Each structure stands twice: as structure tokens, then as C-alpha cells.
Image (cartoon, rainbow, N blue to C red):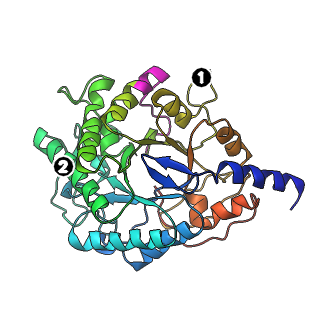
Amino acid sequence: MNDSRTATAERAANLLARPYAINGLDLANRVVMAPMTREFSPGGVPGENVAAYYARRAAGGVGLIVTEGTYVGHESTWASRRVPRFHGDEQLEGWRRVADAVHEAGGRIVPQLWHVGAMRDPGSGPVPEADVLSPSGLALDGAPKGRAMTQDDIDAVVAAFAESAAAAERIGFDGVELHGAHGYLIDEFLWAATNRRTDAYGGDLAARTRFAVEVVAAVRAAVSPRFPVNFRFSQWKANSYDARLAGTPGELEQVLAPLADAGVDAFHASTRRYWLPEFEGSDLNLAGWTKKLTGKPVISVGSVGLDREFMGPKGMAYKPGTTGIERLLDRMERDEFDMIAVGRSLIADPDWPSRIAEGETTKPFRIELLSALD
């Protein structure tokens, strides 16, 4: 190993390999597996292949695994017959085996709980007659789609999140993550373009945050005080990379502070490229601003280890270009954020954390089976 690789390996070992804790959950290091949709669970039931997939990443050195998005127990969110569900006896027994496999491999794991909102197409999924629900009956492009949620709908979906969170603790998971990003239901309430409501759930930022706050509070009440509750959010949406929830740090604080007060233990700030600054006048990325504004533990994410776009037709695999992680280590050295989530690089190479710690920062990836990414 040459001197530069030796130096990088030493920095990685010192920074990424540091233990960390979220609300009492001890993690071996700062590397998180990002949630990525796979659709490998027929009938919503994760099988032995799913258990092996996550256990392999735990064995490769990931400190915390966030599962692919899993549907909560409300028919309006079941957009696919092959996305895993986090409710139902057979589904939960499958997830129990996944958690056990990860723990046996030395890892920690949380499910990402998900309602897709208006991203579901009418007539899709195992209950095609279920309504497409969203804050205002609008798709991300503003076109009419489905119907606006009633108060009864809101209460039922909030309860579904809480029930899935309670189930996660009951079957041995280490915490939960709530999917509040990328234009799905929780994010549709947060974003002015999809939330046109005139009741208590719509209007200014404080009102648009109410649904997310109610979900967090219900989940917090359904689990024990030392069971971590993480919240993933983003500015960008699936159809709009330039979308903004907040145009200034002050507006971002209006979104995040009520969520922190409601019981969020850690934020997962989703960006497409972790090295880009979020607001003018500062080099801080979205995760950095989140930590500064809330004081909570924060996970950053966004093209770690990649140097080019990696999206393609569903199910297609592309070999990503690789790049070093010096920029990441620089940011972690100054404690801009606390953990880093790795997605596409980690699918391609389950041993990414161990390999990085050994200084192999530009070694070509060993490409494994890739699937739809989220």
C-alpha cells in the first residue's frame, strides 16, 4: 500500500470505524446501509434470500442497516405485490428471520416504514380497488390523482405507522426509520406543491408539518423510550431534483424542530450528492444543517464512492465509476454529520466498509445482482 492509501486507510479507520450510539443503540461504526427498493418479496413476505442479502452486508462491516421501504398496514399504500410489508403474521415472521440473521452476523437493523401516497397508481397492488390517497388528490406533477385524505384516513394511516413500529420492536428489530422523503405520502404533506389543503394540515410550513409530527408522536408512543425512531427527509422529489421544502435555514428549522420535539432520535437527510452545499453562504450539506439546527444525530447520504450517474431502466445493472472518499472523511473529521449512508456502492460490494478501512478506495467494484433503487 502506498503512502497516500495508507494515510486514507488510517483516516477511514479513525473516522468511519468510530462507534456511535442513537438513543442507547450502540453501533460498531459510522457506516449505514441506505434503504433501496428491491421487490424480491412475493406476497410482501421477505424470504431467506432477503435475510441472506442483509446479513451479508452486516458481515461486510455495516454498522446499521436500514431496510428497503416496507409497506405499513394500510391498503392504500400497497403499490406492488413484491415489495415487503411490515404487518401480517407471515410477513412479520419473515422479518423476524431477517433481523435474527443480521444480528447473528454482528449487525444492527431497522425497517424503513413507508406509505407511498400518490406515487401508487390506481388499480395497482394486491388490493387494486383501494383508493390512491394523498394530501390533496394530486400527483407530484400537480395533476389530479386519487383523492384527498379525510380525517378518518389520516387517523388510520397514522395508526398503521404506529402498529408497524410496535411490531418492529416486538420481533427484535433495533429501531425504525420513517420514510418522509422523495415525494411519498409524508413528504407530500410537507411539500407545498402537493399539499393544497386549507384545514389544519395545510397552509404554512408549521401546518404542513402536522401530519409528519402526528406520525412521529404516534410511533414514539407505541414503542419503548429507548427504541430509536429515525426520520428520513429530502428536499428533492422523484420527479423534481430541484424541489425545495425549505429555501433557508430558518425554514428548514420550522420543519425539523417540531419533528425533533415529537420524538425523532436521528434524522436521515437524503441528498443526491453529499458534497454539495445546501444553502448559499455555507459549505454545510443538508445533513450538516440538520445537525446544526436540531442537535440530533444525523445520517448523510448521496453517491458515496461514485463518480457518475447510476440510474437506468428498472432491474438493469451498471458498473459505477469509483472515486476516493477523501471529501467524505474531510466532512466527518469536522463533525459536519455523524454517520454516512451508502447505497449503490454497497450493493455492488458488500465488503465496502471493510475494504475502505483497508485503504482500497478506488478498487473496481465486484458487481452483484442489482435491482430497482430508491
- The magenta region covers 239-253
Q: Residue furthest left?
A: 152
Q: The residue under label 1 is which amino acid type?
A: Glu
In the picture, measured across the screen, residue 75 lies left or right of residue 119, that is left
Q: Is residue 248 visible?
A: no
Which of the labelled discs sits on residue 159, or is there none? 2
Q: Is residue 361 visible?
A: yes
Is residue 225 magenta-colored? no
Q: Residues within 10 Å of mark 1 (few under 14, many from 20)?
A: few
x and y percentages locating residue 7 in the rendered image = 82, 51
Q: Which residue is mark 1?
A: 280
In front of the other: 166 or 231: 166
In the picture, measured across the screen, residue 29 lies left or right of residue 24, that is right
Q: Residues within 10 Å of mark 2 (few under 14, many from 20)?
A: many
Q: Residue furthest bottom?
A: 48
Which of the labelled discs sits on residue 136, or is there none? none
Q: Main secondary structure of the magenta part?
A: loop
Q: Secondary structure at mark 2?
A: helix
Quarter occupied by residue 143: top left
Is residue 240 magenta-colored? yes
Q: The residue under label 2 is which amino acid type?
A: Ala
